[in-house]
Amino acid sequence: MRTPRTITLLMTLTAVGALSACSPSEASVGMGIPHLSDLEGFEVVPVAVDGVVRVTEQGCFTLDVLSPADQAADGLWVVWPDDAVQDDKTVHLSDDVSLTEGSRVSGDGMIVALNALPGGADENSMIGMYGRFCGVDTSNVVVLRHVAEA
């Protein structure tokens, strides 16, 4: 017969095991990266965008936008082109370019408020959750159609 102490120990071990199976490893960070295709029906009116990639403690990729000069800002959360793939704190592009903290990039896209994106105003939508997890409330987002290392 199991004692209450044994039952408590078994329940604790089961809970810890379940939580560790659901939690990310130390090597993986953030929620992944959002892609342009996640913004179904959103039309990007492109402008040239240049900046420096940053990776936050939460594993979110942001861009310190250098141009367009009238929209320069630090730490804008990035929605990536569909060919971008995250691997820990690196984003790989289809042309075998890898971007990480400090990478200088250029491309085209649009700088827009999170709430202007499909689902951005809904904190329960994927884009809304991504943005809020990455600290975007009222600040802008960089939606990239194309990006390359500068």
Image (cartoon, rainbow, N blue to C red):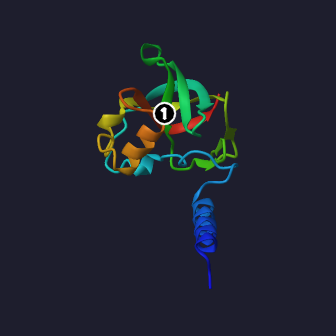
Residue tagged 1: 77
Percent x, y of residue 114: 36, 35
Percent x, y of residue 22: 57, 61
Count of marks, rendered view: 1
Work out whether residue 110 can be spotted.
no
Q: Name above or below for residue 5 compared with residue 23.
A: below
Relative to 55, 80 lies left or right: left
Percent x, y of residue 121: 29, 40
Relative to 108, 40 lies left or right: left
**What crowding class fits label 1: few (fewer than 14 Cα within 10 Å), some (14-19), or many (20 or more)?**
many
Percent x, y of residue 76: 48, 28
- Of the residues shown, which amino acid type is indicated by label 1? Trp
Please tell me which residue is depicted at 33% across the width and 40% down the height of the picture: 117
Please tell me which residue is depicted at 30% across the width and 36% down the height of the picture: 116
Secondary structure at numbered mark 1: strand
Q: Looking at this rendering, what residue extends furthest in the bottom direction?
A: 1
